[in-house]
Image: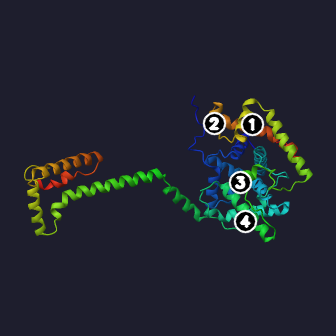
Amino acid sequence: MHWRVDNSPEDRMNADQELVRRVQAGDKKAFDLLIMKYQQRIIHVITGFVHDPVEAMDVAQEAFIKAYRALPGFRGDSAFYTWLYRIAINTSKNYLTAASRRPPVTDVDAMDATIYYDAPELKEFETPENSLMSDELQQAIHDAIQDLPEDTATAIKLREFDGLSYEEIAQAMDCPIGTVRSRIFRAREAIDKQVKAVMGGEEQQ
Amino acid sequence: MTAKQHELLSAFVDGELNSQELDELLSLMSTDDNAKADYQRYQLSSDVLKGYTNRSQPVDLTARISTALADEPVHQLAEQQTRKASVISLPDWFWKQTAGLAAAASIGALAVVGVFNQPQTTATPELAQVEQVQTQTAVAASPNRWTVGEQEVEDRLNNYLVDHNEYAGASGLFSYARVVSYGEE
């Protein structure tokens, strides 16, 4: 069955690439979106090297600033995140060297570094309170997915766990891309209610 | 915020926006702090599901980095470079085929020009006379045949010539036989 494509593949673009192009063209606001999108991952990577939370924030900030300055030279040969990750690693190592501390001997793959946060080489600055909140957050999100209608739950799982694009999910679920988009959005809304509760942001709009 | 705007935030988490929607998103984010907060939570949920988060309080570095970058110059020259790059960034197969066609066309043109111009491009009157004599000798008996006196050698040479002509014709090369017999006209 062939569905009408609401947002054709030619029309859609790589959002990161487009944001990078806009920053290169002088739009600083576009860089804010890249910060918002990747800051948690970058902080996570940096904490594998710099264990003090305050220092890690400083190094993350420095990494983003370096990335901004180097952006005119970024030609998109690799994904933006891979490029940013490399800058974060180098900034962390330089920071440790400057502080006369020994950087880790081996590098960690970008995906491994961000996914396996129990990896021994990735020490983290966790307090009991933070750890408890992180566990609660994960539990709340998974509970929210459990309570979703089947179609909505399937769409968000295919997206988040399997990494499928909207187009691929539409094919897998035999429905239009617009339906996939709205199902994923509804799933996020339901999840967000739980997240807000855990984070203490009870304010409902 | 409207449901459509929230849907926009959700689609951005997944990188599934077109250029116009990205414009809308940038406009929304620059004017609405609620949009920023909502997006951050959407992104956090996505990061948690993918296992990308820390076991620490989620932090937002956007404001402090933006402040730190306030005095940085904006990148402007890159626009021209990226546009220029996008104009010439055609796929490899296009350049390969174009180069192949150009080479084939050049060889064909050279061959045609060479055939039609050769009698006129003879360097000196002496050479022209020698060529004329040789041509008359070579094609005296019949066109596209060698005439060298000894029948056995002549037949063998003519067989070579015919074979060469057939293979050259099949492979698209210019026929040597036609070149040899041009002066017969």
Residue type, mark 1 in image: Arg
Location of mark 3 (residue): A110
The single residue placed furthest to the top in the displayed view is A1
Task: Please tell me whether mark 4 or mark 2 is closer to you in this view.
Answer: 2
Q: Front-most of B43 and A122?
A: A122
What quarter of the picture does the C terminus of chain A occupy?
A: top right
Does residue A168 lie above or below A116 as drawn?
above
Q: Position of residue A115 (x, y in %)?
A: 76, 49
Task: Classify B7 as above or below B127.
Answer: above
Circles 4 and 2 in contact, beta carbons < 8 Å: no
- The CA span between labels 1 and 4 is 37 Å
Q: Which residue is mark 2?
A: A177
The disc, 2 or 1, on the residue closer to the chain's N-terminal end is 2
Is label 3 on the same chain as label 1?
A: yes
Task: State which mark lies toward you, 1 or 4.
Answer: 1
Residue that mark 4 sits on: B70
Does the residue at mark 4 contact the one at mark 3 (Cβ under 8 Å)?
Answer: no
Amino acid beneath label 2: Ile
- Mark 4 neighbour density, 10 Å: few (under 14) some (14–19) many (20 or more): few
Classify mark 3: residues with Cα within 10 Å, few (<14), some (14-19) or many (20+): some
Q: Secondary structure at mark 1?
A: helix
**Residue placed at 25% from the left, 56% from the top?**
B111
